[in-house]
Image (cartoon, grey):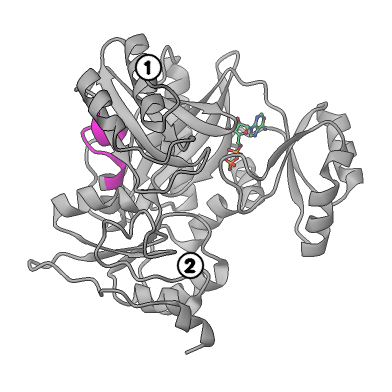
Amino acid sequence: MTGTTARATPGKPPRRAPGGFPVVGIIGGGQLARMCAGPAVELGLTLSVLAEAPDASAALVIPSAPVGEHTDVDAVLAFARECDVVTFDHEQVPADVLTALLDAGIPMHPTPDALVFAQDKLAMRERLTALGIPCPRWTAAHTAVDVEAFGAEVGWPIVAKTPRGGYDGKGVRVIDSAAELTDWLERAAAEDSPLLLEEKVGFSRELAVLLARSPSGQAAAWPVVETVQTDSICTEVIAPAADLDPDLAARATEAGLRIAGELGVTGVLAVELFELPGGEFVVNELAMRPHNSGHWSMDGAITGQFEQHLRAVLDLPLGSPKPRHRWTVMGNILGGEHPELYPAYRHVMARDPEIKAHLYGKGVRPGRKIGHVNVSGDDLADLRERARHAADYIEGAITE
Ligand code: ADP
């Protein structure tokens, strides 16, 4: 035992349901872990979550939620030993912790060999390029000279990324010269880890392929969706993407399935894409867990992504990803100025009984993802208006 273990509080150990049902452990107590709870209850599975805090989003709804850091080897091992399989709410678990889990023989999905391509954008670019999957032109940069050379080659502005740890656009900078990257280059030199540079892609829209793959190799893909970002945060998803060339949809889905197979991904995989004018696409990035682009599937598909992730990590046959409706629109609810959210339900539910609201039990901070709404039907423009209205009303951006 090391001193760091003292930070972990055991909480209630997971209680197995009679009937031979397994315990699925999730490292990280965010909304993705939380939204596995509904399907787990329905399937009779027990979840256990290693949570950042007793009031983490998932810890509020999952009885077994020991508190511990995902960077603390002892805390993670103690947690994982109570579970039959371990999976992840986020991609931040460091390599030494993953190795310790492997060495201890803990079944884990995705495995560290696959997960690294979602943790490290440089590793991802190298691997996808080797596989012949279309990517933006890119390079690894150590110095300002590298940055200037790449900018001169592909044309300014360019996009600079920290290979690890970014989310919601944190860790992404559009730059017109190397001078705008001085602080990152200094840090990269100190850490001896290069930055990722990419050409700035003139995309027509952002798409995502979402699929699940089981350890046995079964895979199931949902229809390709459009993701709409506002200030680098996903704010709306349209499922399926409207007016998408069926050939592009097929090629993108095929690329997603190939990535999943070649990288040995297990669980849900999201492949974020840029659609280019002219019917081509390039891959932006990968996520190996349920993903914002799949929240629509909770209400809009026969099998939602959280149920599918549980099935996949348990190596159960996968459920049908078929949509239940012509369209489903997902609207993210971001934290605004108003900490009180519940009072909005009365208006939103009365105005539109078809809206499905999913709130994450998270405190309101401006710009933070705190929930989403889904609505399905036949009239896309109407659905988009209704989803936006409900999300805006709950976050307090509008009052009528
Ligand atoms: P994060 O991991 O923080 O989500 P992403 O790599 O997905 O970062 O980038 C965030 C957003 O920045 C993307 O959704 C896209 O809008 C924009 N972006 C990222 N890379 C490029 C690029 N090469 N060209 C143009 N826009 C980009």
In this rendering, the count of numbered labels is: 2
Q: Does any atom of ligand 1 lie closer than 8 Å to the CB of label 1?
A: no
Q: Which residue is mark 2?
A: 70
Ligand 1: image quarter: top right
Q: Is residue 321 visible?
A: no
Q: Where is 350 relative to 95, above or below?
A: above
- Viewer-closest of 383 and 212: 383
- Viewer-closest of 385 and 17: 385
Q: Position of residue 21 (x, y in %)?
A: 15, 64
Segment colored magenta: 297-306
> In this view, which residue lies farthest toward the left?
19
Q: Where is 282 relative to 166, above or below?
A: above
The residue sitting at 35% across, 47% down in the picture is: 213
Q: Position of residue 196 (x, y in %)?
A: 72, 45
| SS for callout 1 | helix
Q: Is residue 341 visible?
A: yes
Crowd band around label 1 with a 10 angstrom C-alpha radius: few (<14), some (14–19), many (20+):
many
